[in-house]
Image (tube, helix red, strand yellow):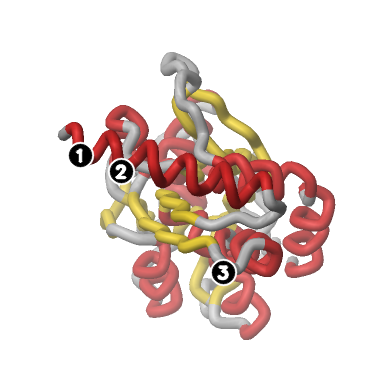
Amino acid sequence: MSALHVVLTIYLNLQSDLYALKGELSGDLRISVVNTVQYVIPYLLKGFLALFPAVNINVNVVNRATALERLNKNTDDLVVMAMVPNERPLTAIPFLDNELIPVLPADFKLTKKGTMTPQQFLDQPLLLRESGSGSRLALEQHCQQHRLTMNPSMELGSNDVIKHSVISGLGVAVLPRLSVLSELKLGLVKTIVLKGFPLRRSWCIVYPQAKNLTPVAQAFLDYVQHHLEQINEHFTNLK
């Protein structure tokens, strides 16, 4: 990092501190979010920007592997993800449950009993995210814990691609509930009751423990923590 960059960073932080002292807030907020959080982050930012309209927001959507890499490099002010590793010196603030549910094509034919075992579901053509994805890791851990096997028929790079692949009839998947709410209501896909599902993980705001947050980043973190009840109520009402 050049001396000029250091001086500029100090200046910008001092400027933000002055705004904060005056009851105002200005500056940049750089956030990386994993793929599944793209359905959540706009609702958090809307309320925050209503309070602090002078803040400039930059949101980068990445997979879990890239999010961890960016945490290691301290690239962002904050990272929002689930499946936070325990072996790293990270601060993680949970704020919302991420429910992963089984999703099938609308015309999928169940047995006469209308039920399925988890293994029968996993034996269908299974659509999965790429290795390193948090949702895939959650499913892999669940299968290991319950002695289930899975043989993916296709790997796809985003939840949206998987969702549309399920709609087209290419297979079944385990997806965040929030990512398929509209499709479930429209009857484009369906879900079923499976033992052990939904898988529940928490979305967290994450940053290195040694990091000194900027006033803008601290204000965003404070906003989310002070509005946990409203945030959870909003997404509960969407189900």
User: Left of 131 or right of it: where is 86?
Assistant: right
Mark 3 sits on what residue? 180
Quadrant holding the C terminus: bottom right
Quarter of image, res 137: top left
Q: What mark, if any, has residue 127 been given in the picture?
A: none
Pointer 1 and pointer 2: residues touching (CB < 8 Å)? yes
Q: Does 3 sit above or below residue 225?
A: above
Q: Does 37 sit above or below residue 3?
A: below
Residue shown at 65% from the left, 60% from the top: 48
Mark 2 sits on what residue? 8
Q: Does 60 sit above or below residue 207?
A: below
Dot 1 falls on a residue whose secondary structure is helix
Is the residue marked by circle 2 packed among few (<14), some (14-19), or many (20+) residues within 10 Å? few
Residue 2 at x, y = what percent? 16, 34
Residue shown at 48% from the left, 55% from the top: 27
Closer to the camera, 174 or 62?
A: 62
The amino acid marked with disc number 2 is Leu
* Separation of residues labelled 3 and 2 (CA atoms): 44 Å
Residue 76 at x, y = what percent? 38, 42
User: Left of 10 or right of it: where is 120?
Assistant: right
Quadrant holding the N terminus: top left
Residue shown at 80% from the left, 67% from the top: 237
Mark 1 sits on what residue? 4
Residue 54 at x, y = what percent? 55, 66
The amino acid marked with disc number 3 is Val
